[in-house]
Amino acid sequence: MLPGALVSIRPVNDSEPIGSPLRVGSNGEFRITSLPLGKYIVSGSWVGIGRPFSKVVEVRSAQPVTINIILHFRPCADQPNDTKAAPLTPSDELAIVTDLISTFYQGQTVKKGVVRDLTIDNFHVKWLTSKQKELIRAAAPREGRKYSRKPHTILKPFQRGDCVGLDVLNGTDGASSYEYRLVNGKWSGIELSSMIY
């Protein structure tokens, strides 16, 4: 695991972790003792990662045992380009972009206005829902309207193996990076980083 990550462990049928979170050492390893036999959820979190990553492991022996746990913390750009991964389809891009836009406008309506301006680069407008189209139109630059910043622009997703990366240029000449993976048939994303210049 990534050195410096915090790791917590809990039984699969319990919401409470066992003890305090453990810090992963510089060698990428951590140790926990005296676990009863059974299945556990191991969760890892790290500064800069928007949500923890989890994996189910099973302890089958009372003897000391080493279990290798790999939690993906690398951004898509650093992932090996596995040609065996299924190529990204237009419907995949639609699901990813729809999820991302919904996080931008969560809980907002057109009547209340939108917080940010948004432009879509390299996407088919027909992919967007009617509500998303209305929100984008409401934020679109209009003649005679003054803007203190540039619109946000969602760039086209790129695929590296089973990971899909997505960058959003923001109105301060910075950018936010997101990554998505297919989890249980649904695209799940996190914000990896955000920079303002």
Image: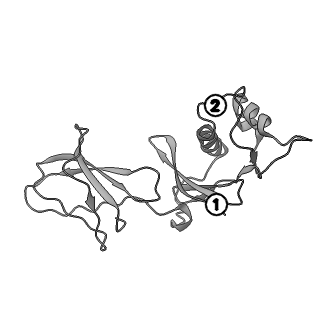
Counting from the top left corner in percent of width and height, residue 18 is at 19, 48
Residue type, numbered disc 1: Ile
Counting from the top left corner in percent of width and height, residue 6 is at 32, 58
Name the residue that disc number 2 marks. 108
Identity of the residue furthest to the top in this view: 111
Give the numbered dot on residue 184: none
Nearest to the observer: residue 2 or residue 149: 149
In three-dimensional space, the C-alpha distance between marks 2 and 1, rounded to whole angstroms, equals 24 Å
Counting from the top left corner in percent of width and height, residue 166 is at 62, 54
* Depicted 183 relative to depicted 84: above or below: above
Image side of residue 21 versus residue 123, left or right: left
* Depicted 151 relative to depicted 107: above or below: below
Q: Quadrant of the C terminus?
A: bottom right
Q: Residue at x 47, y 51 (%)?
A: 50
Identity of the residue furthest to the left in this view: 62
Element at badge 1?
loop
Identity of the residue furthest to the right in this view: 143
Image side of residue 153 versus residue 52, left or right: right
Asked whether the residues under the numbered discs 2 and 1 touch, taking CB atoms below 8 Å apart as contact, a structural biologist would say no
Q: Which residue is drawn at 60% across and 53% down?
A: 87
Image side of residue 10 versus residue 53, left or right: left
Q: Quadrant of the N terminus?
A: bottom left
Identity of the residue furthest to the bottom in this view: 27
Which is more N-terminal, label 1 or label 2?
A: 2
Residue type, numbered disc 2: Gln
Nearest to the observer: residue 135 or residue 14: 135
How would you rate the neighbour count of disc 1 (Cα within 10 Å): few for under 14, some for 14-19, many for 20 or more? few
Counting from the top left corner in percent of width and height, residue 182 is at 50, 46
Nearest to the observer: residue 84 or residue 185: 185
Element at badge 2?
loop
Count the numbered circles shown.
Answer: 2
Give the numbered dot on residue 196: 1
